[in-house]
Image (spheres, grey):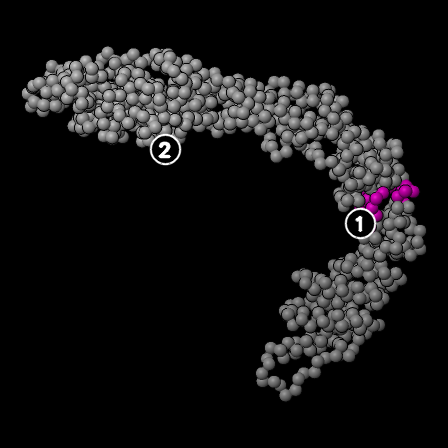
Amino acid sequence: MTEPRFRSLYYTDCLPGQGLRGGAGFQFQAVSPGVGHETMTFVQRSSLYEAPVEWMRAQRPVADYPPSLTHVHDAAAGYVTARGVYLGAEANGVREGNQFTHALATGDARAYGQTRPAQLWDAPWWVERPAPGTVCDPVDAEPEPGPWGVDAIREWVLGRPDAEAWLTAVASAFDRLDGADRKRVLFVGADPAAVLGWIAAGTLLLPQERALRVGFRVYATNPNFSRQDVLAVHPDWAGALGDPARNREHVVFNLDTGVRSDVEPTPAARHWAPRFLRADPYDLLDAVELAHQFAGEHQPTAADRVVAGVVVLGDPVAPAETAALADWLAARPWVSTEDVADPVARMVVDAGPDLAGWRVLDAAMAAHADGALAEPVRLGLLRAELAEVRAGRDPVAGSPALTTRRAAGAVELIESEFAVVPGARVGAVLRLAARFGLVPRLDRVRDGVHRFAQWWADHPDAAVEPDRWPLRDALVDQLRDELALRLTDARAAGVESAVRRTWWRLLLPTATDPRMPLDAVVTAAAFAAGERGVVADVVGRARGLPQPEASDVAWKALFRHARPTAADLAKFFAGLPLGRIGETAATGVHQALADTVITAAELDLLAVLAGQGWEPRQPALRCLQHDDSVLRSWLAALPNLPKTPGAVLGELDPKVLEIRARTLAAALLDRLPPATAAAVLKSAKSGPQEALLDALMAAWGQPRSGPHAVALSYVCAMVATDRAAERFEVKAGPWIRAAGSDSLAVVEVDLTACGGDWVAQWRAYVAAARAIRRKHAKPAPKPAAEPKKPGRFFGRRGDRS
């Protein structure tokens, strides 16, 4: 990119051959290389010197005419700043009106540097006479200003009456030129230097980008025909325009009378004007520019200005501004840590933000974790949160966990809190420590932990979240110690009730010794709450004890609050060592089985207890235990059976056979030949026969054993009760009609092996069932006579012998 420069243009009344047109008259006398027609047209229409007609008619001396300075901006044409002087007579005669204008033009705002156009007033390099030829020199970028340097402007304004109010008003009027409520500004004064001093001062309080868009003309002979927003008129031709009470079209500053329009200060002007008069003016300009940079494409906010003042001027921060500055910093993670984030954070910290401000500031510093203020801010937030805890509030509610950034001294702050905070508030401190990622040292907070455990034990229903705490295990251990102590005194009943209601969930993982009273209370509460897995855990820990101690210890640790089922007890005793069970366990078993409906689970339990040497007190249960033992021995001996295989089963309590029907049916199908199985079925009483029939029919759907089950079901139905046979018929008909020839053949083979006339009867039954299927398959034409539906097995019960 080429360095920016100003192109120069000279305009005046020329002799023939002196100007660019070649002829005589007003024209551009000389321009620097690169000046185009568009630029010349723009300068001619906006920036030439205007001589007052009334003065020319009065033939005022040339020395009376003040020089002019104009500035204008156009999005297409760029920037033009021009100085003009009055020369008097024209070049070719004696008529008044000749003037000379030296204009600077550029399309690059960088050419001005940080100099405001009004500061170019009376600069030494302005040209006031035509060039020897039609080409003149350009002007380098950042030209030397005139007498209105930054320091000079500040000192001059300070010397004006009511300086701060006037500067605020001028800056406010300029600030509004970009807004919807804009009004053109009119200065009235005989001294152009004073006018340009105010214009320079007002534009210094704008960022350079905006200052260069503020066009001005000093002087304008007819303001209505000037395109600039800021105008100056001489008192001689101001007329009513110079009276703020009569001129409503302009914001008027009459320097001769000291009267001005009332101007509502803008926030920016109210902020910068007093600082310009009191701080280093060059720093002030940097602060104005920095606020503009912060705002980007928008107008700077109050926070932008405050931050710029903090960073550049070292302005203090008022407490009321802390929240806004913290929000500002959080919204701009891209700002420099060293140059912006740390200075702003330091000022906010020094001002003492509230808790919300600390939180926002801490979040903002996450993007500047390597900065010097990251740790102090984190400590400040921790102190503010701890103050909330001491005040009885929970500052962590709804707050996210913080990053892993830690500050030196943070752990010590948490630890010191344990020494003073009431037990009821220790939980809040713990949650706070967890949020900050801090783990206090147990040896330094032991007293506080003990106080909290006492409070916690007193408040079992308190809404605490131990899984979110540091030192969780140590706190739970302390709670265990406190509860264990209370189980030894008058508070024991209350502890047991609290454990059953609340504590068992927390303490169950720590209950590892069923001999300890607290562990036993916890595991019993867990079992009563439906945690069946605790049975195996407790039995496994009691297994190392000898009987009868093992059974009694485990029983007390499980079943003190809830009656176990037979399945629970079977699992319980199966896991314990063999030997005589304890009195507590024995009594508990009797109570558990009293008035209980006996099922397979109860028989299994009785079998397990028999292995432990336990016998029921009730005769009926002893009988069932004995007969079930005989049946299990009989099943274990299969397929080796006596010549009368059903003789033993016939002597057993039918209730045992009914309960074990499924087990027995499976043995008949899988472990005995058909003839033997049929003999067993015949020997059974009616109750077991019905149960066996149901068990066998349940196996019809099995691909391998299904046809065998049908054969044995047929035999069973033939020898069982009418009710059993009817159940068979309901299911057999559909099975026969759906079965394939292979399945039916397997049934015939099994029935043949059973001997007797089973096969013949079966075939007749199958034929009848299939006839019904054919009738349903061919509804028309109807046969002459419907086939007679067979009676129950054609009225036969079969041979029971």
Query: What's under tag 1, amino acid-wise?
Result: Ala
**Is residue 506 left or right of 602 when viewed as pictured?**
left
> Quarter holding the C terminus?
bottom right
Q: Is mark 1 on a helix, strand or loop?
A: helix
Give the residue drawn at x 69%, y 34%: 465
Q: Quadrant of residue 768?
A: bottom right
If you read the primary sequence from the N terminus, does the residue marked by circle 1 or circle 2 appear first?
A: 2
Give the residue drawn at x 84%, y 30%: 485
> Quarter holding the N terminus?
top left
Which of the numbered marks, if any, corresponds to residue 181? 2
Q: In this view, does 669 lie above or below 614?
A: below
Q: In which quarter of the image is residue 11?
A: top left
Q: Name the residue under label 1.
A: 567
User: Which portion, as a residue range, is magenta?
Assistant: 560-586
State how far apart marks 1 and 2 are (Cα): 88 Å
Nearer to the camera, 341 or 203: 203
Nearer to the camera, 64 or 467: 64
User: Residue 716 at x, y = what percent?
Assistant: 78, 68
